[in-house]
Image (cartoon, rainbow, N blue to C red):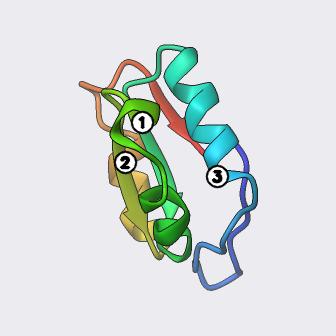
Amino acid sequence: MTGEITLRGRVLPVGGVREKILAAARGGMTAVILPEANRDDAEEMTAAEIGDLKLHFVATLDEAMPIALRTEATALAWI
């Protein structure tokens, strides 16, 4: 996991989104949680680079927790 949240639960943007998505795809992850502020970075990537990854964009910790803790997700990466 990488990233940062504020004391009020706001998810802050991260760097190296492209590299993190590529690593998650290579590592066999099925989903990635990204800060909403990094949506543009992810949308610059091609469908071939993203592969079968499901990208979830969140602005707050309240949005991220249900995604991260769902039981049917066996391989989930927070980046």
Q: Residue at x 48, y 59 (%)?
A: 44
Q: Looking at numbered disc 2 in the image, what kind of residue is underneath it?
A: Leu
Looking at the image, is mark 3 or mark 1 earlier in the sequence?
3
Disc on res. 17: 3
Q: Mark 3 falls on what kind of element?
A: helix
Q: Residues within 10 Å of mark 2 (few under 14, many from 20)?
A: some
Residue bearing the label numbered 1: 50
Q: Mark 1 falls on what kind of element?
A: helix
Q: Looking at numbered disc 1 in the image, what kind of residue is underneath it?
A: Ile
Q: Residue at x 37, y 48 (%)?
A: 55
Q: Mark 2 falls on what kind of element?
A: strand
The N terminus, quarter of image: top right
Report the Cα–Cα distance between label 3 and label 1.
Answer: 11 Å
Looking at the image, is mark 2 or mark 3 earlier in the sequence?
3
Q: Residues within 10 Å of mark 3 (few under 14, many from 20)?
A: some
On screen, 55 above or below 58? above
- Determine the image quadrant of residue 20: top right
Query: Which callout, 2 or 1, points to the residue nearer the camera?
Result: 1
Q: x%, y% of residue 21?
A: 56, 39
Q: Are marks 2 and 1 in contact (CB under 8 Å)?
A: yes
On screen, 50 above or below 13? above
Q: Which residue is at the front of the view, 65 or 20?
A: 20
Left or right placement of residue 70 versus residue 35 in this view: left
Residue bearing the label numbered 2: 55
Q: Residues within 10 Å of mark 1 (few under 14, many from 20)?
A: some
Q: x%, y% of residue 19?
A: 69, 40
On screen, 77 above or below 18? above
Report the Cα–Cα distance between label 2 and label 3.
Answer: 11 Å
